[in-house]
Amino acid sequence: MSTPADTAALLARRARTLAPTYQLFYEQPLEIVRASGVWMYAADGRRYLDAYNNVPVVGHCHPQVVEALCRQARTLNTHTRYLAEQPLQLAEELLGTLLPESGRVIFTCTGSEANDLAVRISKAVTGGSGFIITEFAYHGATDLVAGLSPEDGNPLGPGVYTVAPPIGPQAAASFGARVRRCIERMQADGVRPAALLLDTIFSSEGVASDPRGFLADAVSAVRAAGGLFIADEVQPGFGRLGEAMWGFQRHGVTPDLITMGKPMGNGHPIAAVAGRADIFSEFAKGRRYFNTYGGNSVSCATALAVLAVIRSENLLENARRSGEYLRRGLCTLAERGGVIRDVRGAGLFIGVELGQNPASGLTGAAETRRVVNGLCRRGVLVGSTGRNGDVVKIRAPLTLEEQHADLLLEALAHTLRSAA
Ligand SMILES: Cc1ncc(COP(=O)(O)O)c(C=O)c1O
């Protein structure tokens, strides 16, 4: 069992060895030593309900996923320059949920690489160089996509234009009009649009899911101007929103390119770009793309097991049902206390916007920080998001059940009522 002195020693070593760009969660940082299902266990012996991590989508250390990974690691791990079953089966299964008629896939290792590649492809096939993103977007960490990720404090890259995010019914209804005006600005500057790149749940913006279909007008606008629509599914993909596998399906649109990652390997690094076959054919003219670890045998076997568990445990339906239960509970809390200003999201991707709390005397971001840390002390892990930092972010593994949601709701009610 670890002691506060052990924690202090780890913090000191971290400060000596890791770059200061890294950040830790929570005022009292956690040393997590193992995890299973929706639970994470800390070195001090405490157990935490994980309502934050979207990566372990089928639950931490799912035995079927771990077994598939180990079995493949014992058998063979190689790259995509040999014929093999796993990458083909994985591509077929993914395309079956994405673009059944004619799609293609390129595997990468991270969401950043997937977005970087999608950006390159869209430039190459459209001849354009202009990109539209939302104002506080995050799309990854390579030099190219850092220029499309203002959330991290990066300057915008060349040809990158922003639009205000669709947070709230009015901003969602006028989203298409904002994208149209943005295209006009771009064209007035002599820049040809290459793509509209959107996280289809707008996670870093504070979560925007409704009304269904609000993306369609924006997608038509960029296509009419010769650009592509890239759906960044790194956060909402793999069933997180309940009902469907992908966030864009909520909006009745079919993207030209789709990027995915995070939950794809339940914690094992695998990601991909999928899209229309003709787009990849055009990109491939005179060009090769090889990613040593993208599509390796072990990663593909792991991702196949993740897809199998999502199907066999009916996790889309569980995400829909548990998410709805949790949202109903959050709305009841909102009616009671007045601190919760809005509850947004779908399935198990929920944003809870906080206002002023008379109990703590705090408001917005300060209240959100207090709530996130208060929940942690009460054994429930959540995060925060949004440009103003005033949205509690809940993204539990899709195996979350009503009894777990009750624990979260109880801890939240307690925290909102308390001064500490
Ligand atoms: C919407 C979105 N896109 C892309 C990425 C980058 O993925 P990765 O960290 O795997 O490079 C992230 C990571 O947080 C993300 O949230």
Image (cartoon, grey):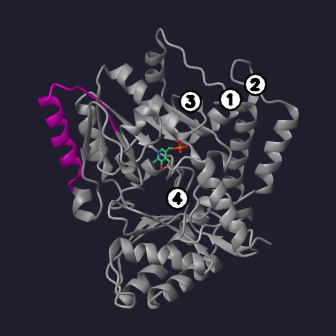
Question: Where residue 294 sits in the image (x, y, percent)?
Answer: 63, 30
Residue underneath mark 3: 105
Does dot 2 land on a helix, a strand or a loop?
A: loop
Tag 4 or tag 1, which sits nearer the N-term? 1
Do the CB atoms of the residues marked 3 and 1 lie less than 8 Å apart?
Answer: no
Does dot 4 land on a helix, a strand or a loop?
A: loop
- Closest to the observer, 260 or 47: 47
Residue underneath mark 2: 84
* Distance from the alpha carbon under mark 2 to that under mark 4: 32 Å
Question: In the rendered structure, does residue 201 fall within the stretch colored magenta?
Answer: no
Residue 343, which numbered label? none
Question: What amino acid is at disc 1?
Answer: Leu
Question: What amino acid is at disc 2?
Answer: Ala
Residue underneath mark 4: 243
- Closest to the observer, 48 or 22: 22
- Which is closer to the viewer, label 3 or label 4? 3
